[in-house]
Image (tube, rainbow, N blue to C red):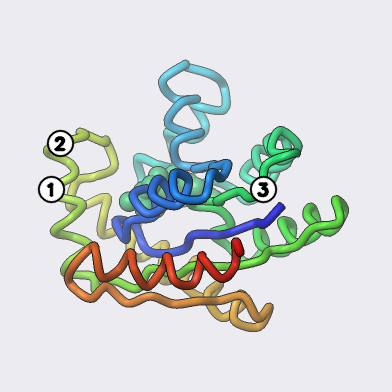
């Protein structure tokens, strides 16, 4: 089973490209943001805790996120690959993830980083706000998410580079061009 992390700032397109990859290669998928939004919708204890952080544009504490991931991981047994969308987001999460995979005889096989300028990100998120109405897609909270991203998540890019799995793709202005670059790399990985 190939473990593929999709990495990037809020609005970089993690969910969009994940869906494309899931369809093209027949992969499993977990979006930790979607998991948390599901918990909020269902009014669970976890959802209540998560909402307080998400509304402030903050990351959920590492220990909670690591437990969530651990509880899902075994459900992917038998898949030829899994896309991790929005996890790991801190170095502590990445270290725990690496360990979790190692215990199962696996590793992180690839990290796909979506590199997109902040002006484009803001424009996309504000447009998405009108379509999807996500509570954290307002200008004030988006700015807080960018701050959190730069402080805690962006440094993790280097961590993946040190693991020898980082592949960066810079937004070329067109989705088709972005996709063809990612597909070329993924075709090799999944061959
Ligand atoms: P996009 O979906 O456009 O890439 P995003 O990365 O901000 O934007 P999600 O991945 O859906 O959106 O995450 C939404 C929120 O959920 C985050 O701002 C954070 O509060 C919380 N969250 C999701 N994944 C994690 C994680 N691995 N660690 C901590 N918090 C998380
Ligand atoms: Mg997303």
Q: Judge whether 58 appears above or below 53 on screen.
A: below
Q: Position of residue 120 (x, y in %)?
A: 17, 66
Please state if 168 lies on the left or on the right of 94 as rendered: left
Badges 2 and 1: C-beta atoms under 8 Å apart? yes
Q: Is mark 3 within 8 Å of ligand 2?
A: no
Camera-side residue of 32 and 91: 32
| Neighbour tally class for label 2: few under 14, some 14-19, many 20 plus, Cα within 10 Å | few
Residue 57 appearing in the image: no
Please state if 109 lies on the left or on the right of 126 as rendered: right
Q: Residue at x 32, y 56 (%)?
A: 13
First in residue order: circle 3 vs circle 1: 3
Q: Residue at x 18, y 67 (%)?
A: 174
Numbered badge on residue 80: 3
Please state if 90 lies on the left or on the right of 127 as rendered: right
Q: Position of residue 49 (x, y in %)?
A: 52, 32
Badges 3 and 1: C-beta atoms under 8 Å apart? no
Helix, strand or loop at label 1? It is helix
Q: Position of residue 102 (x, y in %)?
A: 84, 59
Residue 70 lies in quadrant: top right
Q: Is mark 2 within 8 Å of ligand 1?
A: no
Helix, strand or loop at label 3? It is loop
**Residue labelled with disc 2:** 131
Numbered badge on residue 111: none
**Residue labelled with disc 1:** 127
Q: Quadrant of the C terminus?
A: bottom right
Instruction: Give the distance between the C-alpha atoms of the residues marked 3 and 1, in whole angstroms.
Output: 35 Å
Q: Residue at x 45, y 50 (%)?
A: 24
Helix, strand or loop at label 2? It is helix
First in residue order: circle 2 vs circle 3: 3
């Amino acid at each position: 089973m190939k473990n593929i992390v999709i990495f990037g700032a809020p609005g970089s397109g993690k969910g969009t490209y994940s869906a494309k990859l899931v369809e093209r290669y027949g992969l499993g998928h977990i979006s930790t943001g979607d998991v948390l939004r599901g918990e909020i919708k269902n009014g669970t204890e976890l959802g209540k805790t998560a909402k307080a952080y998400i509304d402030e544009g903050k990351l959920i504490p590492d220990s909670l996120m690591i437990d969530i991931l651990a509880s899902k991981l075994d459900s992917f047994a038998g898949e030829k690959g899994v896309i991790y969308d929005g996890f790991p987001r801190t170095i502590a999460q990445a270290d725990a993830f690496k360990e979790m995979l190692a215990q199962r005889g696996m590793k992180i096989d690839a990290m796909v980083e979506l590199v997109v300028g902040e002006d484009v990100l803001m424009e996309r998120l504000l447009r998405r706000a009108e379509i999807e109405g996500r509570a954290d897609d307002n200008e004030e909270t988006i700015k807080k998410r960018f701050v959190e991203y730069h402080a805690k998540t962006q440094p993790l890019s280097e961590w993946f580079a040190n693991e020898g799995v980082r592949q960066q793709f810079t937004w070329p202005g067109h989705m088709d061009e972005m996709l063809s670059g990612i597909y070329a790399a993924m075709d090799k990985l999944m061959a």
